[in-house]
Amino acid sequence: MNNISIYTEKLRESGLRPTRQRLKICELLFSPEKTFHFTINDLTKIIEDKLSEKISLATIYNTIHAFKKKGYLKEISINSDKSYFDTNVTEHHHFFDEDTNELIDCSNDDIDSVNIKKNITGKKIKSIEVLIKVASDNQNQN
Amino acid sequence: MNNISIYTEKLRESGLRPTRQRLKICELLFSPEKTFHFTINDLTKIIEDKLSEKISLATIYNTIHAFKKKGYLKEISINSDKSYFDTNVTEHHHFFDEDTNELIDCSNDDIDSVNIKKNITGKKIKSIEVLIKVASDNQNQN
DNA sequence: CATTTACATTAAAACAATTCTAAACTGTTG
DNA sequence: CAACAGTTTAGAATTGTTTTAATGTAAATG
């Protein structure tokens, strides 16, 4: 199975037809070896720069949301300015570099498992996420 | 020292003069016994409803930001729609109820301390926050 | 193989949260 | 009271995101 058919499959699974534009987006998201963190703005810039083709914002948003809904992308909340997305959809944690606004994966192996002693009646835990904010030593805390 | 002088002090510390509007905001934020979580929108609604007076959005934003900068309020990132603020500025964690969009404090006692084995060269850890998303049992995971 | 139909793409408009601006206001201080 | 530094305000501007309405495309049907 080559990449194109993998992407086609992912799109179909997400309820989308495999169009030229969407396949381009897939290539950017899913071909890199290492997982990749981005905002919609980042992605739009990459498309403009690397691809000769222009894809409209609406298409980008639609596609990303369909992938998120299906679970092929994870949304990460850092600050309320913008949404970050992560191609690593496994349960894992993050470092956020306040100097560069960069998001760095932190695997479960890098953190002792988080043990929660309290629980909310009638509610089930859906996810546990640790966010570690870092900055250069000589930086003010935010 | 009565409340007014405490508020005056907080405002001065945050680099703001104690004006009528700002004291009203302080009263809402700092008089309740228990800590309180809110969005700017929540706060604006409370001011409109509870107070006879109208305070302009710009003043609310300015005041909240000055308090945040000074450390009298903490900003919590849940999703990218809006900013949540917390009057509990001690290091602590949160439950987020996906059904009601409600934020619930989780003290350090309720979580075994988080031990991070990895570190980022040249960077210092500024904060470690755990966010536990919960929902009713029969709810779809997001 | 032309037509229908459902889904796609697009630019632009709408929207919501937040920030900025410029004018009017308040309260001190010389 | 005049001057000034900091405030408040309504509304405009900005930013990220979603919606809309027109047009385009491609698979399915007859």
Image: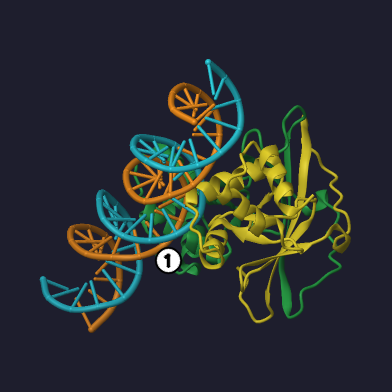
Chain colours: A yellow, B green, C orange, D cyan
Q: Residue at x 72, y 63 (%)?
A: A32
Q: Is residue B104 left or right of residue B60?
A: right
Q: Is residue C12 left or right of residue A45?
A: left
Residue A86 falls in image quadrant: bottom right
Q: Is residue B55 above or below residue D28?
A: below
Give percent across and percent down for residue B93. 73, 52
Q: What kind of element bears circle 1?
A: loop
Give percent across and percent down for residue B8. 46, 61
Give percent across and percent down for residue A125. 78, 39
Q: Residues within 10 Å of mark 1 (few under 14, many from 20)?
A: some
Q: Please report, as a chain letter, where disc 1 is located.
A: B
Residue B95 falls in image quadrant: top right
Q: Is residue B98 left or right of residue D13?
A: right
Name the residue carrying label 1.
Answer: B16
Q: Residue at x 76, y 64 (%)?
A: A34
Q: Residue at x 43, y 56 (%)?
A: B61
Is any part of residue B11 visible from this angle?
yes
**Total numbered labels placed on residues in the image:** 1
Residue A93 falls in image quadrant: bottom right
Is any part of residue B82 visible from this angle?
no
Q: Residue at x 73, y 38 (%)?
A: B134
Which one is nearer the viewer's eye here, A46 or A4?
A4
Q: Quadrant of the C terminus of chain B?
A: top right
Q: Is residue B54 above or below residue B126?
A: above
Which one is nearer the viewer's eye here, B126 or B122?
B122
Which one is nearer the viewer's eye here, B32 or B14?
B14
Identify which amino acid the numbered label 1 is placed on.
Leu
